[in-house]
Image: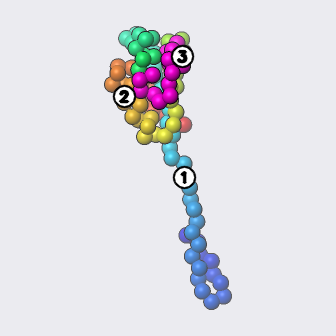
Amino acid sequence: MTFSQSSSSTLLERVKDTQRYPEARVIVLNDEVNTFEHVANCLVKIIPAMNEARAWKLANKIDKEGSAEVWCGPLEQAELYHMQLSNEGLTMAPIERC
C-alpha cells in the first residue's frame, strides 16, 4: 500500500502487484529401454491435446537429439505430467522452469 495525503485526511491506495504463476518444462530423455511406440503411447495418454502424429515426432526427436520438451505450462501441471510419465517408465529430466 502507498499513502497519499490530502490537506486534511490520509487516503490509502491499493497497489496491485501481479506475479506470474511459475511455469515449467517437461522433458523426456532418450534411453535404451523404452520403444518408440511406448513413448508415443504414453505421450498421447498423459499430455493433454497430444495427438499421435506429434507424439511420434517427439519420440523421434528424443531418439535423435537425446531429449525433447513434451509440455510447457503451469508448474503444478508440469509436476503431475512429469510424475505420470516417470511412472510409465520413461526417463525424465528434472523439471525446468520456463
Pointer 3 and pointer 2: residues touching (CB < 8 Å)?
no
Q: Position of residue 62 (x, y in %)?
A: 50, 16
Give the Cα separation between the discs numbered 3 and 1: 36 Å
Could you say which quadrant of the image residue 13 lies in? bottom right
Element carrying mark 1: loop
The numbered dot on residue 84 is: 2
- Residue range of the region highlighted in magenta in the rendering: 43-61
Q: Residue at x 59, y 79 (%)?
A: 11
- Give the structural element (helix, strand or loop) at label 3: helix
Residue depicted at 41% across the width and 35% down the height? 79
Q: Give the quadrant of residue 5.
A: bottom right
Q: In the visual, does 4 lie left or right of 32?
A: right
Measured in 3D between alpha carbons, the distance from the residue under mark 2 to the one under mark 1, in whole angstroms, is 28 Å
Can see residue 58? no
Q: Name above or below for residue 19 compared with residue 66.
A: below
Q: Which residue is mark 3?
A: 53
Q: Main secondary structure of the magenta part?
A: helix
Query: Label 3: how many residues lie within 10 Å, few (<14), some (14-19) or many (20+)?
Result: few
Q: Position of residue 50 (x, y in %)?
A: 50, 24
Please name the amino acid that badge 1 sits on: Gln
Say which label, 2 or 1, has the lower sequence index.
1
Query: Tell me, what colour scheme is on the image?
Result: rainbow
Mark 3 vs mark 2: which is more N-terminal?
3
Q: Give the quarter of the figure containing the N terminus.
A: bottom right
- Spatial CA span between label 3 and label 2: 21 Å
- Which residue is located at x 60 percent, y 86 percent? 9
Looking at the rendered image, the disc whose residue lies closer to the viewer, 2 or 1, is 2
Residue at (35, 21) in percent of width and height: 88
Q: Nearer the viewer, residue 50 or 28?
A: 50
Q: Give residue 19's mark.
A: 1
Q: Amino acid at mark 2?
A: Gln
Dot 3 or dot 1, earlier in sequence: 1
